Amino acid sequence: MTDVAKARFPILPVKYFLKFPFNSSVCIQKLSCSLTVFHGTADKVVPYALGRQLFEQAACTDKTLVTIPGGAHNDLASFKEYQLEMERVLGGIALKQGE
């Protein structure tokens, strides 16, 4: 959260304003389940570079980063890449449960 705030407001001392900084890096390093991350390259809330950096820190071995060219923060569902990968991921879950 601190890195996102710094990216958006580079001249402000953001660490003093964040009551709950939520360190995603620490959390994702403890992850052991499958992980699929969708991130748009045009995201102005969480810069793509920060999303990719966080993805790379994930400790799990079964992980996928789905990059949506031109995708912003709240419009990923309108992209074909998102829809196809979501079908694949959710289809796999449904198959596992039905076994």
Image: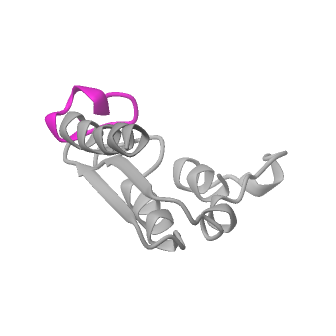
Above/below status of 78 relative to 28 = above
Describe residue 88's horizontal placement relative to residue 64 as left or right: left
Is the C terminus in the top left, top right, bottom left or bottom right quadrant? top left
Residues shaded magenta: 71-82
Above/below status of 53 relative to 41 = below
Describe residue 77's horizontal placement relative to residue 53 as left or right: left
Q: Name the residue at the left extreme.
A: 80
Residue 25, position as x, y percentages in the image: 62, 66
Describe residue 69's horizontal placement relative to residue 13 as left or right: left
Describe residue 32's horizontal placement relative to residue 64 as left or right: right
Q: Which is more toward the observer, 92 or 73?
A: 92
Which residue is depicted at the point 60% across and 59% down? 3
Residue 26 lies in quadrant: bottom right
Which residue is depicted at the point 28% across and 49% down? 41
Which residue is depicted at the point 65% across and 52% down? 1
Residue 75, position as x, y percentages in the image: 31, 28
